Image: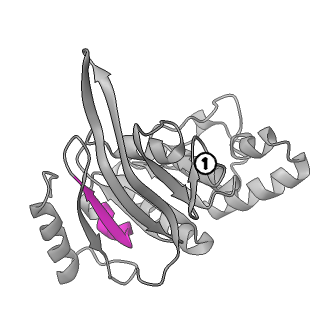
Amino acid sequence: MDGKKVKLSLKHISQSYIVQNEVSDAVVDISLDVYDNEFLVLLGPGRCGKTVTLNMIAGLEKPVEGTIEVDGEAITGSDERIGMVFQKLALMPWKTVMENVEFGLKVKGVPKKERRKVAQKYIDLVGLQGFEKAYPNQLSGGMKQRVGIARAYTNNPEILLMDEPFGQLDAQTRYSMQDEVLRIWQSEKRTVIFVTNNIEEAIVLADRIVLLSNYPAKVKEEYPIDLPRPRDTMSEEFLRLRRIIGDNTDLAL
């Protein structure tokens, strides 16, 4: 990524918890630069510390050591330049799609007409036009994820964190949502940090994969992915990368 602007920088961040009166490390000394408009994937086994890392970037947890910088400026706590899409979406069931998507702007005091215009742009972008008045219980799993993505983008983050957002979806919907996320990313060009434990998904999506070790999380390896999009999952180079990454981790192929 020579010559690219560093958007986010993790400098020696660590996290630990007290478990049964003993200190348990969750993340150990992770240093990582993420570049402007990069689609970075954090790949690692379940419960290895990927979500903890994302939570520290989002300001939901404070590192016990190290610093996090956005555009060269140290941040503490949440930052409006960073948005997050969770695996378990916290959609408000009593609010419509439109009301869920515009909620962040409403909290900020943006006038109704203006926030509706912005929310409609992202509802359209994720392919939910016509569902503005629907409630979450009327939507499929994939449609709910689209609402979560639209809501995150409506708040205009410069960095979007995605914590295994497709983990609860069936295979066909998951593939469809991968295509959607790439389409939106290419349209909007934000910096994305995407967490997954699926090797194929990582290679399909990433400009660069950062492989994390088993718990506690450390950076084990980095893999630049220089394949044209859309990616052919049966191509020789794709399968070679899949094999190399699989040989370096406990993740199943």
Tell whether 3 sits left or right of 46. right
In the figure, 103 relative to 175: above or below?
Answer: above
Instruction: Decide: few, some or many residues near mark 1? Use Cα within 10 Å; few <14, some 14-19, many ≥20.
Output: many
Q: Quadrant of the C terminus?
A: bottom left
Instruction: Count every numbered label the image shows and give the total.
Output: 1
User: In the rendered structure, which amino acid carries the disc numbered 1?
Assistant: Val
Res. 103 image quadrant: top right
x then y, percent, for residue 55: 46, 41
The single residue placed furthest to the left in the displayed view is 247
Tell whether 201 sits left or right of 214. right
x then y, percent, for residue 160: 54, 56
Q: Which residues are magenta?
A: 201-212
Q: Quadrant of the N terminus?
A: bottom left
- Magenta segment: does it hold 192? no
Residue 51 makes an appearance in the image: no
Res. 19 image quadrant: top left
Residue, disc 1: 147
Tell whether 201 sits left or right of 81. left
Q: How is the image coloured?
A: one colour
The single residue placed furthest to the top in the displayed view is 21
Looking at the image, which residue is at 30% across and 49% down?
A: 29
x then y, percent, for residue 157: 64, 57
Label 1: state its secondary structure. Answer: helix
Frontmost residue, 100 versus 52: 52
Looking at the image, which residue is at 33% across and 27% down?
A: 17
Frontmost residue, 166 versus 171: 166
Residue 245 makes an appearance in the image: yes
x then y, percent, for residue 186: 54, 74
Res. 246 image quadrant: bottom left
Looking at the image, which residue is at 29% across and 37% down?
A: 26
- Magenta segment: does it hold 205? yes
